[in-house]
Image: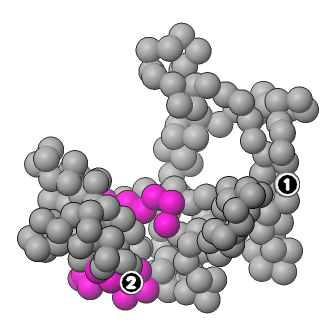
């Protein structure tokens, strides 16, 4: 890919890294305050800008790659389809997304102030169907390669299981924690594929 959009860029770290590797990278972030504090140089240069995902200020098919990581679970449910349609609209080739399927971790902590921050909890099949509705094609091979999905986890391997989502809006699904050091390990480790 030659150019990319980081949709929900936060502190702009991905845009900065991609630009350091010669890519034409741009970012959009809801919070202007975050951009002013974390990456004022890129804000001034116009590499990142404040904006909303429901109305992206870019022409159709502007980016080879549209990236969004841990953003879509925070949008308002009534905006979900518009956000999805906008991400698909500005993408020329690839959409790479990470979307949390579980509630915010603070929901079970002693300080519950951040509970409910994941306002858009939907099962994977809902997200895939919604992106397909607007013309995206789900690349299952890439998905499985990135997930390194493993069906070996059963019974005692799973803990703190809970139902997430809404039966009346997208469906319920089970989310469990597993203890697996290779999820954060290095490729050189012998237990990694």
Magenta span: predominant SS is: loop
x and y, in percent, of residue 124 in the image:
67, 60
Decide whether residue 58 is among the magenta residues.
yes
How many residues crowd mark 2 within 10 Å: few (<14), some (14–19), many (20+)? Answer: some
Residue 160 horizontal/vertical position (percent)? 83, 45
Q: Residues within 10 Å of mark 1 (few under 14, many from 20)?
A: few
Q: Residue at x 77, y 68 (%)?
A: 165
Is residue 70 one of those drawn in magenta? Answer: yes
* Residue 66 percent across, percent down from the top left: 35, 63
Dividing the picture into quadrants, the one containing residue 122 is bottom right
The part of the chain drawn in magenta is 50-71
Estimate the x, y position of residue 176 in percent, counting from the top left: 79, 45
Do we see residue 118 in this rendering?
Answer: no
Residue at the disc numbered 2: 52
Callout 2 secondary element? loop
Of mark 1 and mark 2, the one earlier in the sequence is: 2
Q: Name which quarter of the figure residue 117 lies in.
A: bottom right
* Residue located beneath label 1 in the image: 162
Report the front residue among 70 and 138: 70
Decide if residue 59 is in sight here.
yes
Taking the spot 38% from the left edge, 60% from the top edge, the residue there is 67
Residue shown at 51% from the left, 60% from the top: 70
Q: Is residue 137 shown left or right of residue 102?
A: left
Marks 1 and 2 sit apart, C-alpha to C-alpha, by 32 Å
Residue under the image location 49 percent in, 76 percent down: 84
Residue 154 vs residue 161, the one in the foreground = 161
Q: Residue furthest front?
A: 110
**Picture layout, residue 18 above or below residue 149:** below
């Amino acid at each position: 890919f030659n150019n990319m959009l980081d949709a929900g860029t936060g502190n702009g770290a991905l845009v900065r890294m991609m630009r350091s590797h010669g890519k034409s990278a741009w970012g959009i972030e809801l919070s202007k305050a975050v951009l002013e504090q974390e990456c004022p140089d890129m804000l001034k240069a116009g590499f990142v800008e404040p904006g909303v995902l429901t109305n992206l200020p870019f022409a159709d098919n502007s980016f080879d790659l549209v990236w969004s990581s841990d953003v879509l679970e925070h949008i308002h449910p009534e905006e979900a389809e518009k956000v999805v349609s906008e991400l698909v609209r500005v993408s020329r080739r690839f959409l790479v997304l990470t979307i949390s399927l579980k509630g915010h971790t603070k929901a079970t902590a002693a300080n519950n102030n951040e509970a409910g921050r994941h306002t858009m909890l939907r099962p994977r099949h809902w997200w895939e169907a919604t992106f397909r509705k607007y013309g995206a094609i789900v690349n299952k091979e890439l998905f499985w390669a990135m997930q390194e999905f493993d069906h070996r986890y059963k019974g005692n391997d799973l803990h703190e299981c809970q139902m997430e989502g809404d039966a009346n809006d997208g469906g319920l699904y089970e989310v469990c924690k597993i203890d697996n050091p290779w999820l954060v390990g290095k490729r050189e480790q012998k237990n990694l594929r």
